[in-house]
């Protein structure tokens, strides 16, 4: 993610990559179990991210003449200066 921000984007908001391999396997097992119990795969809910990361590139913001509010900077997981 940092690469996108470094490449002159001001803000990037992306799903947090907090899942480990064991989390992914566990979730796959839950889906497989539901399918084996007779549920239709097309009726299973799609997993949506619930946590997001915010990365702000202050150097690009300043070059564009943008002023980033302090509250937004405080909420960012990473600020690139």
Image (cartoon, rainbow, N blue to C red):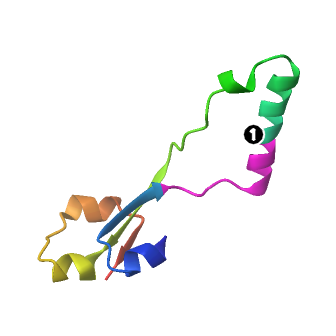
Q: Position of residue 32 (x, y in %)?
A: 83, 32
Q: Quadrant of residue 73?
A: bottom left
Q: Quadrant of residue 42?
A: top right
Is 57 magenta? The answer is no
Position of 60 with respect to 17 (left or right) is left
Q: Residue at x 79, y 32 (%)?
A: 30
Q: Residue furthest right?
A: 36
Q: Position of residue 23 (x, y in %)?
A: 74, 48
Residues in magenta?
15-27
Task: Give the residue at mark 1.
Answer: 27
Q: Residue at x 32, y 79 (%)?
A: 8
Q: Residue at x 29, y 71 (%)?
A: 10
Estimate how packed mark 1 is, as few (under 14), some (14 to 19) or many (20 or more) residues with alpha carbons within 10 Å.
few
Position of 7 with respect to 2 (left or right) is left
Q: Residue furthest top?
A: 38
Q: Position of residue 35 (x, y in %)?
A: 82, 25
Q: Residue at x 75, y 20 (%)?
A: 40
Is 19 magenta? The answer is yes
Nearer-the-camera pick, 35 or 51: 35
Q: Secondary structure at mark 1?
A: helix
In this rendering, is residue 80 above or below 28? Answer: below
């Amino acid at each position: 993610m940092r690469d996108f921000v470094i490449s002159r984007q001001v803000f990037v908001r992306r799903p947090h990559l907090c899942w480990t391999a064991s989390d992914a396997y566990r979730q796959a097992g839950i889906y497989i179990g539901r399918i084996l119990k007779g549920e239709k795969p097309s009726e299973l809910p799609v997993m949506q991210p619930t946590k997001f990361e915010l990365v702000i590139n202050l150097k690009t913001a300043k070059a564009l003449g943008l002023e980033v509010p302090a509250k937004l900077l405080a909420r960012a997981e990473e600020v690139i200066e």
